[in-house]
Image (cartoon, rainbow, N blue to C red):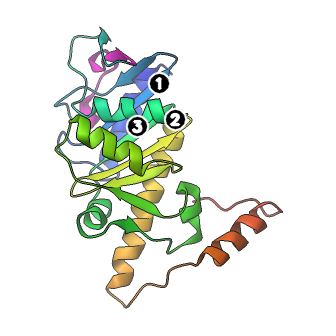
Amino acid sequence: MSLREQLCEYGRRAVDLGLVIGTSGNLSVRQGDRVAVTPSGAALDRLTPEMCPIVDIEGRLVEGDLQPSSETPMHLAVYAATDAQAIVHTHSVFGTVVATTMTELPPVHYNALLLGGVVRVAEYATYGTPELAANVRAAMEGKRAALMANHGGVTVGATLEEAFEATRLLEWLCEVYVRALGVGKPAILTEKQLAAVVERSLDPPSFPRL
């Protein structure tokens, strides 16, 4: 499956799972010094491969007729700072709730370790700006996910499938936290408890995944 075909496939999945609405959200996947990204202003469930532009690592359009997503600077900033090969950005409901009310998502479940533990909320900045790109880049340091204040979430992976599964996990963790608040004060796992999970993951059974 080509890079552009992957964007179409996972764009449809994002819509089907309610992770985006309308033309919100964007995805990208990198191969060498080229990045295929979803186009600006397009519904992710209506993409065709030829609609997806390809840019170089400086953001210059090298292939395609449509303009790349307005969030392309954020994607490129994350690529420059990490070894990520794919990025998914969504406006999922529970992720946005947490991003609108908190400065971080605490580890309420050990699967938070799959995202790097505590998920930081990047400081707010207008979408598509260098300021937002810098804020997300900082929040992503050492992590596979970050939330964006009053905006949404972003995840990375070695493949688009990995980045997408990280997005699903991020939304699940946010939903668990938000729903737990409706019952009482959520218990937060301590560093010692998380360290015990890491230690156990080195032995059978294998590290748990959703």
The first of marks 2 and 1 along the sequence is 1
Q: Nearer the viewer, residue 171 or 134?
A: 134
Image coordinates for residue 162, horizontal then vertical, percent: 54, 42
- Establish if 152 lies above or below 79: below
Q: Secondary structure at mark 3?
A: helix
For this orientation, the residue located farthest to the top is: 62
Marks 1/3: CA distance? 15 Å
| Secondary structure of the residue carrying numbered label 1 | strand
What residue is rendered at 25% in x and 70% in y? 101
Mark found first going from the N terminus, 2 or 3: 3
Contact flag, marks 1 and 3 (Cβ < 8 Å): no
Give x and y (percent) for residue 71. Answer: 26, 34
Q: Is residue 56 magenta?
A: yes
Name the residue beneath numbered marker 2. Answer: 84
Q: Is residue 103 magenta?
A: no
Q: Nearer the viewer, residue 4 or 96?
A: 96
Q: Which residue is mark 1?
A: 30
The crowd level at tag 1 (other Cα within 10 Å; few <14, some 14-19, many 20+) is many
Mark 2 vs mark 3: in front: 2
Dots 2 and 3: beta carbons under 8 Å? no
Q: Residue furthest right?
A: 203
Q: Is residue 11 left or right of residue 86?
A: left
What's the amino acid at mark 1? Arg
Which residue type carries mark 3?
Tyr
- Say whether marks 2 and 1 touch (CB < 8 Å): yes
Q: Which residue is mark 3?
A: 10
Task: Tell me: residue 81, above or below residue 32.
Answer: below
Tell me the magenta residue range: 44-57
Q: Quadrant of residue 201?
A: bottom right
**Residue shown at the point (16%, 31%) measured from the top left:** 41
How many residues crowd mark 2 within 10 Å: few (<14), some (14–19), many (20+)?
Answer: many
For residue 56, the mark is none
